[in-house]
Amino acid sequence: DERERMVYEMVNAIDYLRKERIGAIIVIERDISLGNYIDKAKKLYADLTSDLLIAIFYEGNPLHDGGVIIQGDRITCAGAVFPTSDSVKISKRLGTRHRAALGISEESDCIALVVSEETGSISIVKSGQIKHNLDPQKFPTALKKILGQK
């Protein structure tokens, strides 16, 4: 099943990124188009694989500071820049990636996954709500659940 493979690839990449403390923001498009952000980023249109996600966010890669957008089972672009949230509810400890994930989730129905460069923690952001510091063992189940929701 396409969703199972997607989850498998993203979980493998995120597990590696968190262990190595490599920051990442992965945005999964749903019903509301993220075309405006894709247009301004580096287009890839590549199969979603954990190796490609890891390579994109590797610190030596020029695209590592931006985000990745996934449409269906394809990585559409890398190096995407998202609006940051102005919410006063967000913890001061959370950085730009978390603010960008919140910002894009406030604008669309996307799901954003964040790996903290500082702590290696994993967050899922949806509808302006952040689930921070997820247990790596429970992350795959949480991701499957949230991907199944509309």
Image (cartoon, helix red, strand yellow):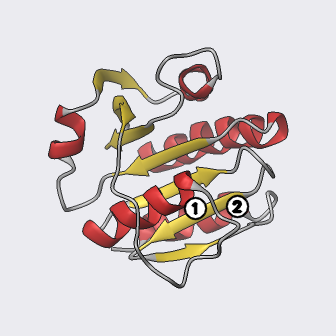
Q: x, y percentage for residue 85? A: 40, 68
Q: x, y percentage for residue 12? A: 69, 37
Going by the numbered disc 2, the residue's amino acid type is: Phe
Vertical relation: 127 (above or below) 8: below
Nearer to us in this view, 146 or 111: 111
Apparent side of residue 76 relative to residue 27 in the rendered image (left or right): left
State which quarter of the image contains the C terminus.
bottom left
Q: Is residue 108 visible?
A: no
Nearer to us in this view, 46 or 144: 46
Going by the numbered disc 1, the residue's amino acid type is: Leu
Nearer to us in this view, 147 or 34: 34
Q: Residue 79 carries which label?
A: none
Apparent side of residue 81 relative to residue 129 in the rendered image (left or right): left
Disc 2 crowd rating (10 Å Cα; few below 14, some 14-19, many 20+) is some
Q: x, y percentage for residue 50? A: 60, 29
The image quadrant that residue 43 belongs to is top left
Vertical relation: 135 (above or below) 119: below
Identified at 42% across, 50% down, the residue is: 27
Vertical relation: 85 (above or below) 38: below
Q: Mark 2 points at which residue?
A: 139
Q: Is residue 113 visible?
A: yes
Q: Residue 143 carries which label?
A: 1
Q: Is disc 2 placed on a helix, strand or loop?
A: helix
Disc 1 crowd rating (10 Å Cα; few below 14, some 14-19, many 20+) is some
Identified at 34% across, 60% down, the residue is: 104
Identified at 59% across, 19% down, the residue is: 55
- Mark 1–mark 2 distance (CA, rounded to whole Å): 6 Å
- Tell me whether the residue at label 1 lies in contact with that at label 2, contact meaning CB atoms closer than 8 angstroms: yes
The image quadrant that residue 143 belongs to is bottom right
